[in-house]
Amino acid sequence: MLSSSELRLRRKRRQRTAIRRVIRNRYRLCVHRTGRHIYAQIIDDANARTLVAASTVGKAVSDIKNGGNKNAATFVGALIADKAKALSITEVVFDRSGFLYHGRIKALADSAREHGLVF
């Protein structure tokens, strides 16, 4: 029987393979979550550079008490979308890093879509 972390890594590998087929001229919105925080970054895979990053760790989110809930994920989704719009990035490919599309991951994705990112 595989552990939950091994299952997540399998999903991550499978998803990255699918993303490589469709990425073309788009950037990748990569999401990572821990028990306490959630992180999002927009990556340019062609040049191996992180263009925009947002997380619940930092000065911009000091008013959020708990970084590990849906409200924090919604805030990070809005923050990453606003930073991306400032760089005129509108279309991305969503990379959930093997995490299930549920709860905080879904809240972040919905918030990013509401604030102008297309994926």
Image (tube, helix red, strand yellow):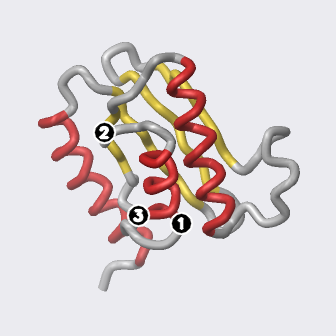
- Reading the chain from its start, which is encountered first: label 2 or label 3? 2
Q: Position of residue 71 (x, y in %)?
A: 66, 64
Placement of 9 over or under 7, stated as above or below: above
**Which residue was labeled with disc 1?**
104
Distance of mark 1 from mark 3, alpha carbons?
Answer: 10 Å
Amino acid tagged 3: Phe
| Category of crowding for the residue at label 2, using alpha-carbon neighbours closer than 10 angstroms: few (below 14), some (14–19), many (at least 20) | many
Q: Quadrant of the N terminus?
A: bottom left
Q: Is residue 46 left or right of residue 70?
A: left
What residue did someone put label 2 on? 93
Residue type at mark 1?
Arg
Residue found at the very far bottom of the displayed protein: 1
- Identify which residue, 20 or 103, lies in the foreground: 103
Q: Quadrant of residue 7?
A: bottom left
SS at mark 3? loop
Q: Along the line of sight, which residue is nearer the eye, 3 or 51? A: 51
* Residue 37: % across, % down: 68, 58
Cα separation between marks 1 and 2: 18 Å
Q: Secondary structure at mark 1?
A: helix
- Residue reaching furthest to the top: 47
Point out the tag, 1 or 3, that comes first from the N-terminus.
3
